[in-house]
Image (cartoon, rainbow, N blue to C red):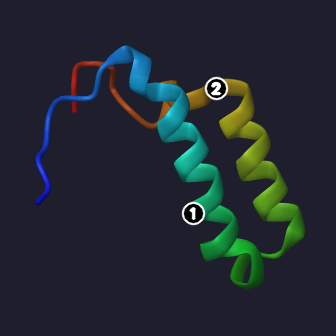
Amino acid sequence: MYSTRRIETEDAGNLVKLWRQAWIATYAESLGADALSAMLSNLDAHGSSELLPGNGE
């Protein structure tokens, strides 16, 4: 069984780890190493702040 809840500030680190793994698995072949590297660098630099508006979504 699954449940949902609002994302809390302390969830951001684990969410970024999940995105990193998912992006590598999903985009490595289709986008190529340079584009994937740029995406991961941006993720490392900004974390979830550019991907989540910060109000519990």
**Which image quarter holds the C terminus?**
top left
Which amino acid does the dot numbered 2 rest on?
Answer: His
Q: Residues within 10 Å of mark 2 (few under 14, many from 20)?
A: few
Q: Is residue 22 left or right of residue 56?
A: right
52 is higher (above) or lower (below) than 10: below
Q: Which residue is mark 1?
A: 22
Position in image of residue 15 (x %, y %): 47, 39
Which amino acid does the dot numbered 1 rest on?
Answer: Ala
Position in image of residue 36 (x %, y %): 77, 61
Nearer-N-terminus badge (1/2): 1
Q: Residue at x 60, y 29 (%)?
A: 47
3 is higher (above) or lower (below) than 10: below
**The quadrant where residue 53 appears:** top left
Q: Which residue is mark 2?
A: 46
Outermost residue to the front: 1
Position in image of residue 18 (x %, y %): 53, 50
Q: Residue at x 57, y 63 (%)?
A: 22
Q: Is residue 25 left or right of residue 6?
A: right
Q: Residues within 10 Å of mark 1 (few under 14, many from 20)?
A: few
Badge 1 element: helix
Q: Residue at x 87, y 69 (%)?
A: 33
Comparing labels 1 and 2, the label whose residue is closer to the camera? 1
Position in image of residue 37 (x %, y %): 83, 55
